[in-house]
Image (tube, helix red, strand yellow):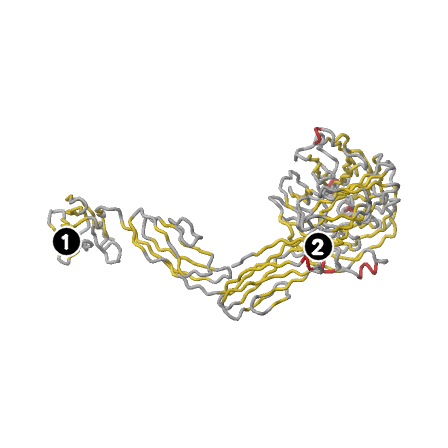
């Protein structure tokens, strides 16, 4: 038996989760979806099931600055916010089998124009190359229209495609990779749109070993300083390598290539941690993930920093950093995996194989692709420090890579604003969450940056609670701490008080109580600030039960009676069975209206799982009258061995007589309940039809009844 006790506590939060970002809604896989908007105080996004898209691998989605969906695509079809095919949004030149088939990039400084970049796939021999289409969101009443489609960007193509923020904080680089080469092309999108001439880098290993070398993934670190490139191995059991490059987000150039390889590894995809220090390399076929320190100066040092996590039965391929600071992982499943603390070195990164169950959908081999800084931008936005969690005083710091004179507009989420770059604000009350928004604009150029976060000025947010399982007879109780701390990297300490003079500092203690009784078990959460300390108490009843069900009853047909239990004491959970004719099987005193005789069992439990049971029988008397069966089987099997009338108490029996087919009286009695056994002078009578006669008087009105009928003897 399990019982929960939950209390909500508000306490210190870092820069996650972000809200109202352009990647707050994801669509991917087999109609899978996640919504990162509605998660204040939660460590998980909400699974949504309204997608109409099938995406085997690559895909993309985009929201407005308030985190509301604009459109999404698998590189072939574009779906608008109403989950309908956008006007002219069919037959794009991408491929659902391309690892990074689709990438959506807003034009800087423009509230309506978006590029959709697509890549072809190995299955089509990369024939369509890299192309782009243009969406205008002012068309079709704000639902958007593809106004230009499948414009050739670069004929030489792989399945790799990614994007990075320019060092100016506004423009965007789109990076492509020529087929069977080490050539990278970096295309600039600024306030004037896509520039026609790319920056070309020839760096690293020429990937022409096999046609599958052109499949794989590219990712840029959130700080815009490094690029990871993977490719598929030529053969199923051959090891391969990943390449790590320095990336200059001011010039678009790649340099300093390093091959990251292990003799037992086949890398297919990759992702960086939010702080850009760690790189996660996914080994789909090996069912493993390698974590390495990407900022170390040499390939040898990076390789030596390897930590390997087994992914169980999951062969992940899709991997993507999310707005909540976690890295999510996709495979052919109804679940998404996750790395919950990706900035933590080693197994403390908290890998989970089945983090989120999707809503009437499934993931497949890909997750949406985004510009590198949409989930976490260390160069543009804001951070904050809680100066006093008890009073809710917060110091905010705005930062931007944009040049020139900047304007800062803060919305603190409580009706107050500020135009300072680094304001201090006090919240009243402190023990709730506030959606803080910052708009940064440049007085020279088209620069406009919107960032927002949920801020908890009282500190962290936690759900404090516990469950327990007990062996009542042995008084052994296993406690499970169900508390969740947000952010989950916050430092807190738990202390259990078992109300018997003992305590424990374990997260999930097992405790044996010395004697039966009722104990008020308390779980305390302790922080570095006393005003944030909270506790929750639950009564644990380890008292043995000794119950007695209500007495057996004899009732008239059609009568309703109430059952009950004595001696339940601390018992609070009732189960009656069978459920036939009962008003409720889960309460102490249900009503029963039986049609026939019945025996009920009641089990009573308390919160700790202690239990006892008892029975109550109900005999149902028939309606007033005289009833005679139409046959019987006198074979001494204990069933229907006598034939006799049922005469209720309202009637006085004068005579019950039986005649054979020749009119001979073979049995007679005036005693209620007496019957004939099928014999005459000790001799069994033949099967066949017999006549009965009953003479009786109704005592309620002295009316006399003379009844006659037939029955049969059945020999088995």
Up-down: is 14 above or below 472?
above
Furthest-bottom residue in this view:
514
| Residue 116 visible in the snapshot | yes
| Residue 706 visible in the snapshot | no
**Residue 669: mark:** 1
Residue 486 image position (x, y, % from top left): 68, 53
Alpha carbon separation for disc pair 1 and 2: 93 Å
The residue nearer to you, when weighing 281 against 580, is 580
Image-based side of 51 in relation to 475, left or right: right
Q: Secondary structure at mark 2?
A: loop
First reached walking from the N terminus: tag 1 or tag 2: 2
Q: Residue at x 62, y 53 (%)?
A: 8
The residue nearer to you, when weighing 320 against 55, is 320
Q: Residue at x 14, y 53 (%)?
A: 669
Circle 2 crowding by C-alpha within 10 Å: few under 14, some 14–19, many from 20: some
Residue 697 image position (x, y, % from top left): 16, 46
Image-based side of 533 in relation to 606, left or right: right
Furthest-top residue in this view:
140
**Residue 26: mark:** none
In the picture of the structure, the residue carrying the numbered disc 2 is 390
Residue 131 image position (x, y, % from top left): 79, 36
Q: Quadrant of residue 199?
A: top right
């Amino acid at each position: 038996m399990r019982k929960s006790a939950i209390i909500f506590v508000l306490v210190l939060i870092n820069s996650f989760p972000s809200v109202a970002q352009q990647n707050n809604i994801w669509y991917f896989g087999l109609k899978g979806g996640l919504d990162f908007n509605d998660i204040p105080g939660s460590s998980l996004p909400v699974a949504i099931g309204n997608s109409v898209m099938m995406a085997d691998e690559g895909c993309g989605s985009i929201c407005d600055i308030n985190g509301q969906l604009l459109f999404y695509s698998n590189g072939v079809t574009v779906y608008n916010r109403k989950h309908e095919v956008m006007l002219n949004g069919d037959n794009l030149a991408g491929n659902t089998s391309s690892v990074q088939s689709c990438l959506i990039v807003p034009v800087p400084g423009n509230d309506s124009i978006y590029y959709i970049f697509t890549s072809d796939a190995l299955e089509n021999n990369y024939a369509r190359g890299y192309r782009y289409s243009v969406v205008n969101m002012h068309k079709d009443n704000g639902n958007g229209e593809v106004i230009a489609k499948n414009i050739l960007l670069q004929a030489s193509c792989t399945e790799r495609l990614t994007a990075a923020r320019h060092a100016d904080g506004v423009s965007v680089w789109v990076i492509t990779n020529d087929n069977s080469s080490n050539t990278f092309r970096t295309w600039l999108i600024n306030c004037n749109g896509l520039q026609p001439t790319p920056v070309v880098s020839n760096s690293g290993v020429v990937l022409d070993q096999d046609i599958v070398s052109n499949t794989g993934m590219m990712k840029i670190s959130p700080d815009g300083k490094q690029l990871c490139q993977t490719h598929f191995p030529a053969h199923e059991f051959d090891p391969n390598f990943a390449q790590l490059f320095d990336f200059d987000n001011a010039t678009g150039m790649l340099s300093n290539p390093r091959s990251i390889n292990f003799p037992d590894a086949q890398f297919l995809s990759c992702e960086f941690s939010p702080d850009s220090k760690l790189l996660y390399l996914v080994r789909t076929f090996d069912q493993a993930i390698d974590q390495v320190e990407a900022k170390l100066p040499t390939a040898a040092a990076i390789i030596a920093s390897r930590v390997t996590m087994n992914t169980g039965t999951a062969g992940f391929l899709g991997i993507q950093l999310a707005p909540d600071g976690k890295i999510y992982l996709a495979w052919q499943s109804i679940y998404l995996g996750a790395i919950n603390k990706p900035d933590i070195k080693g197994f403390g990164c908290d890998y989970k194989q089945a983090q989120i169950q999707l809503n009437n959908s499934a993931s497949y081999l890909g997750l949406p692709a985004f510009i590198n800084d949409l989930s976490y931008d260390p160069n543009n936005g804001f951070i904050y420090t809680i100066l006093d969690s008890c009073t809710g005083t917060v110091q905010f710091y705005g930062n931007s890579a944009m040049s020139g004179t900047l304007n800062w507009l803060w919305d603190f989420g409580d009706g107050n604003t500020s135009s300072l770059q680094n304001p201090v604000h006090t919240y009243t009350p402190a023990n709730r969450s506030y959606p803080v928004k910052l708009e940064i604009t440049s007085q020279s150029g088209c620069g406009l940056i919107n960032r927002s976060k949920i801020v908890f000025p009282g500190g962290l947010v936690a759900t404090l609670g516990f469950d327990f399982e007990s062996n009542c007879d042995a008084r052994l109780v296993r406690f499970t701490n169900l508390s969740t701390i947000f952010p989950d990297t916050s430092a807190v300490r738990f202390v259990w008080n078992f109300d018997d003079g003992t305590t424990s500092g374990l997260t999930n203690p097992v405790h044996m109580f010395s004697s039966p009784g009722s104990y008020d078990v308390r779980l305390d959460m302790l922080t570095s600030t006393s005003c944030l300390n909270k506790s929750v108490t639950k009564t644990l009843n380890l008292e043995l039960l000794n119950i007695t069900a209500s007495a057996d009853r004899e009732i008239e047909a059609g009568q309703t009676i109430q059952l009950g239990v004595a001696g339940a004491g601390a018992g609070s959970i009732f189960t009656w069975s069978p459920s036939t004719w009962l008003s409720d099987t889960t309460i102490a005193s249900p009503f029963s209206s039986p049609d026939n005789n019945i025996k009920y069992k009641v089990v009573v439990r308390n919160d700790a799982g202690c239990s006892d049971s008892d029975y109550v029988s109900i005999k149902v008397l028939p309606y007033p009258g005289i009833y005679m069966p139409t046959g019987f089987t006198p074979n001494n099997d204990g069933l229907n061995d006598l034939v006799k009338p049922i005469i209720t108490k309202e009637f006085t029996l004068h005579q019950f007589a039986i005649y054979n087919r020749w009119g001979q009286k073979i049995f007679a009695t005036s005693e209620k309940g007496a019957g004939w056994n099928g014999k005459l002078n000790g001799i069994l009578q033949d099967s066949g039809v017999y006549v009965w006669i009953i003479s009786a008087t109704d005592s309620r009105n002295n009316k006399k009844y003379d009844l006659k009928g037939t029955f049969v003897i059945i020999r088995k």
